[in-house]
Image (cartoon, grey):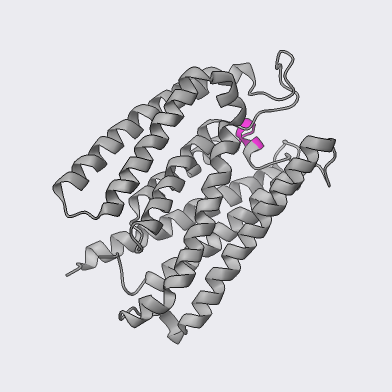
Amino acid sequence: MESGSARKTYLYLRVGLVALAVFLGVSLVIEIAFGDTEWQGSISAYYYTPVRSVFVGTLTAMGVCLIAIKGRDRPREDLMLNLAGMCAPVVAMVPTPLEDADCSGSGRCVPQAFVPGVVNNVEALVVVGALGLLFAARTVRRGDHERGDLVALGLAAAGLVGFTIWFAVGRDSFLSFAHYGTAVPMFGLIVAVALVNAARVEEFVAAGGTLPMGRSYAAFKRAYRAIAYSMGVVIGGALVLFVVKAATGSEPFAHWVFVVEALLLVAFTAFWILQTVQYAEDGAPE
């Protein structure tokens, strides 16, 4: 039977992730409203501003939380949360390339002054990731596990190996594309998690789960779907605009990427609050 301390720990972990999203949002608002930095074209570009510490710390901590929190739908939700958690620190530690940097003929690049820091951080991340996988493998081996757990462990290991090879062999392309190559999948995985939760609300209630404030499962289902569809539309629209810009060089306005990322951050926060409220009474999954 789940203890009160375990229930509170699970709840506080989830609330902490919401607090991290709010922390990043407040830091951005303070810099935009009162700082000396001009409004940047993307949230990621604030890596190069006084927001950097909050940006890196927040996304790294979010990654840890996403991996630590166990999804109720194994292996789908748990796997997607783990993979999203693996992506988050890379989004934080590998900054978005800049157009006005010294790129030696390339249009966009990470400024050379920041490259040693990126290399150091990613090397440390690879080592910790390998240790984490060894721990996960030992846990799966010693405990009761399903076939899906082994598949999830294999996918995570393959992802880490591929990531490490890309970093070691294709350093220039890694610095140019690793940020985007992990940011898009991270948000895509969160969309998928929201859809999984929308499909499972009725099952959650049928199994004895308690919804707060007397809400019906239909209300939660609609809310999950609305969040997932909103994030999907935003991501799809962003991809279209990115392709148009790459092909023609034109874009709707200079800060459209910032708006896209801000909308996704708000949607992610709304999803996590909704899920935390849903599971507040029932605690951690079995």
**Residue at x 61% of width, y 64% of height:** 229
- Residue 270 in picture, x, y percent from top left: 55, 64
- Residue 273 in picture, x, y percent from top left: 49, 65
Task: Using the image as rendered, state which of residue 94 and residue 51 is in the foreground.
Answer: 94
**Residue furthest to the top:** 104
* Above or below, comparing residue 184 to residue 216 in the picture: above
158 vs 223, left or right, is left
Question: Does the rendering let one see residue 125?
Answer: no
160 vs 246, left or right, is left
- Residue 167 in picture, x, y percent from top left: 48, 23
* Above or below, comparing residue 98 to residue 37 in the picture: above
Image quarter for residue 52? top right
47 vs 90, left or right, is right
Q: Quadrant of the N terminus?
A: bottom left
Q: What segment is highlighted magenta in the picture?
A: 45-50
**Residue at x 60% of width, y 37% of height:** 180
